[in-house]
Image (tube, coloured by chain):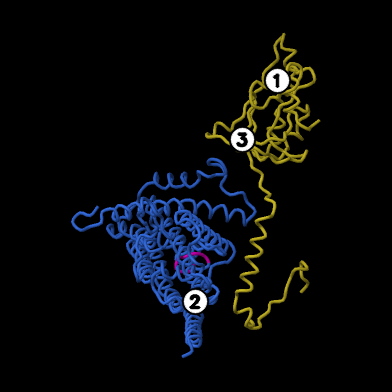
Amino acid sequence: MQALTNRAQEVSRKPMTFMERLYIPSILKGMAITFSHIFKKQPTIRYPEQKREFSPVFRGLHVLNRDEEGRERCTACGLCAVACPAEAITMEAAEREVGQENLYREEKYAAKYEINMLRCIFCGLCEEACPKDAIYLSETFAPANFTRTGFIYGKDHLLIPNPVTEPEAYAAAKGQRN
Amino acid sequence: MTLLAVDWLLIIEKLVLIAIIVFASLGIALYTTFAERKVAAVLQDRPGPNRAGPFGLLQPFADGLKLIMKEEIIPTSSNKALFVLGPGLAMTAALMTCSVIPWSSHIEIFDRKIDLQIADINIGILYIFGVVSMGVYGMMIGGWASNNKFSLMAALRGASQAISYELAMGLSLIAVLMLSGSLSLKTIVDGQMAAGSYWNIVYQPLGFIIFFVCALAECNRTPFDLPEAENELNFGYHQEYSSMKLGFYLFSEYINMIMSSAVMASLYFGGFDIPFLDESTLAPNIAAIIGVAALLTKIAIFIFVFMWIRWTVPRFRYDQLMNLGWKTMIPLALFNMLVTGALILLKAGV
């Protein structure tokens, strides 16, 4: 049989030699190995203070995007909810009133937009389904919460800060995506 | 100050000494649990507990508080009196060991010479053996009273393991006793401190290895922690215990570890002796203080080795454990005893 790796070894059934039966050399060898680990670098990331660098394609918490003038892009078409394999997205559509043109980009908008972060599997299919580039997955992940309802993120959690009035918060929320 | 022909100062002095030693060993045991976790972490490339207080130094108090706050459960089918007695006995036996260990020479306060040893009894080492075998009762009674087959099996294992390894331990000890000619720990340490003599480890390397392995087995430390082999016996003899009763069992294990380190340091590594230093040239109080520091350093090194072994060597199988104890340790200890006796006779020119 061909071995899958080059690490395979024949099983040896020969009786142990006297030195092997003493066990002490091998115990000392093992102890030397563990002792050498005292001086090794710890790979631990001390989480709340240090954070792991995510790759630019990391799929974390969702962000509802705005356009350059700060208007919400989402038109509540529901394609993301249809695409969602975990059925985590619900929304309610509303019609834009006169005078709200600076808030919503098109005539229809999402009055309510909720994602259940406990259901969400962070696959990114909503992002792919969206025809308006209104939703994308950011580089952060959902923080812990004490209640289940705390994981249902509404528009107040998801909507990105306004790039016109709060450019710094917008840039921070946007991350490295373009 | 003698009243009713009793030296009351001596009683006060001993009571203070007992209080200091008991609380110190409890405090050290508290931090040994912390050290265990830190050593385990460092050997496994982890940082270990580091959240409670600076460097996690308050962690043992958090653990203790947690254990105290837990619900006290006494199983209905258990033997209640024995169930409570078990952990108490384990803890008492563990703490009683420290009474014959010479912590240092003596200090002088107001012309009064105070020995830093609770009791210098002439059968010190026999006393330790007696008390250590009492410790087995804590485990046995706890396992029996739990009315749980896993606990009972673990207790049986623990008892038979302790008995098997006590034999080899005692036999390896006889060689030391032949060298020093005394059972008193103080005399054994003084003999090693005397000018021109070396530590017993120089004369008894094999005896020390046997004693050390047996001490590991006596303290139920890995690789001999069969009484709590999780994969076979769930949690061992303290399976049914909760809250501070469990804490007592775990704690007594650490105190046993400290005490066996102290005994090993006294028997083989000169006790409170500092190598390459003549203590008699120093003021007695200073010599006593560095003596305590030296003994504590030796204990710390032993405890580190205990932990180092725990996080390196996997657990024995039960038959391997018995084979090692009866077929290897006891013959080796007998051989060591015979060789030592022959050499002593040869040197004496008989």
Secondary structure state at the residue bearing disc 1 = strand
Chain B image colour: blue
Instruction: Report which colour depicts chain A.
Output: yellow
User: Of circles 2 and 1, which is in front?
Assistant: 2
CB within 8 Å, label 2 to label 1: no
Q: Amino acid at mark 3?
A: Pro
Q: Residues within 10 Å of mark 2 (few under 14, many from 20)?
A: few
Towards the viewer: B193 or B137:
B193
Give the residues drawn in magenta, as a range. Answer: B216-222
- Kindly identify the amino acid type of the residue bearing the numbered disc 1: Tyr
Q: How much space separates mark 2 and mark 3, taking CA atoms?
A: 50 Å
| Label whose residue precedes the other's in the sequence (1 or 3) | 1
A41 w.r.t. A73: above or below: below
How many numbered marks have been drawn onto this rendered protein structure?
A: 3
Q: Do callouts 1 and 3 mark residues in contact (Cβ within 8 Å)?
A: no
Q: Where is residue B69 shown, x and y percent of the image?
A: 39, 44
Give, as a three-letter code, the residue at label 2.
Asp
Task: Inspect the magenta stretch and tell me whether residue A33 lies in it.
Answer: no
A67 left or right of B322 in image: right
Residue under numbered circle 2: B319
Given the current orientation, which residue lies at the most extreme left position? B4
Q: Are marks 2 and 1 on the same chain?
A: no
Relative to the observer, which residue lies in front, B3 or B44?
A: B3
Q: Nearer the viewer, mark 2 or mark 3?
A: 2
Residue position for label 3: A143
Identify residue for label 1.
A109
Residue at 46% of width from left, 71% of height from top?
A: B191
Residue A14 in the image: state x and y as whole percent.
66, 83
Q: Are marks 2 and 3 on the same chain?
A: no
- Chain bearing tag 3 is A
